[in-house]
Amino acid sequence: MFGPSSFPRVFPSLSLGKVVSGISKTLGMVNQIIPIYKEAKPMINNARNAINILKEFSNSTTNRVMSKKEENLNLVKEQIKNMGNKINNSNSKGPTFFQ
């Protein structure tokens, strides 16, 4: 009455040996993948950070450096003009030897 033929078999080709074998193979793959993932994760994060840093440098620093150089150049030009004006004003009071 309660033999193997009395219960319907849902998975007729499934056996305990096959299940254990499949679990063993899966755990073996996981044991190989986890160390690789742990080693690669910092490199991937650093690559993302490096890309973000490069984007920031390409966008903003060029403009900032150029604007600083232009500001410094304008200040130097103004100082040269002021020095020239001072020299011309001081020379107008006395004789000029070289012109």
Image (cartoon, rainbow, N blue to C red):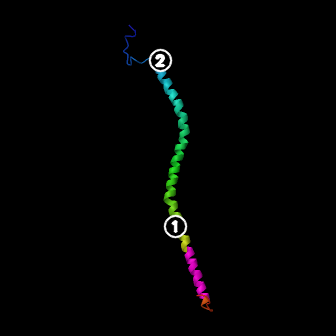
Q: Which residue carries the number 2 mark?
A: 17
The answer to whether residue 10 is above or below residue 1 is below
Look at 47% across and 23% down and name the residue there: 22
Look at 55% across and 72% down and name the residue there: 73
The answer to whether residue 89 is magenta is yes
In which quadrant will I find the N terminus?
Answer: top left
Give the main secondary structure of the magenta stretch: helix
Distance between the Cα atoms at labels 2 and 1? 74 Å
The answer to whether residue 63 is above or below residue 54 is below
In which quadrant will I find the C terminus?
Answer: bottom right
The answer to whether residue 65 is above or below residue 74 is above
**Residue 53 horizontal side relative to residue 12, left or right:** right
The answer to whether residue 14 is above or below residue 77 is above
Q: Which residue carries the number 1 mark?
A: 67
**Residues shaded magenta:** 75-90
The amino acid type found where label 1 is placed reads Ser
x, y (%) of residue 21?
Answer: 48, 21
**Residue 4 horizontal side relative to residue 30, left or right:** left
**Which label sits on residue 36?**
none
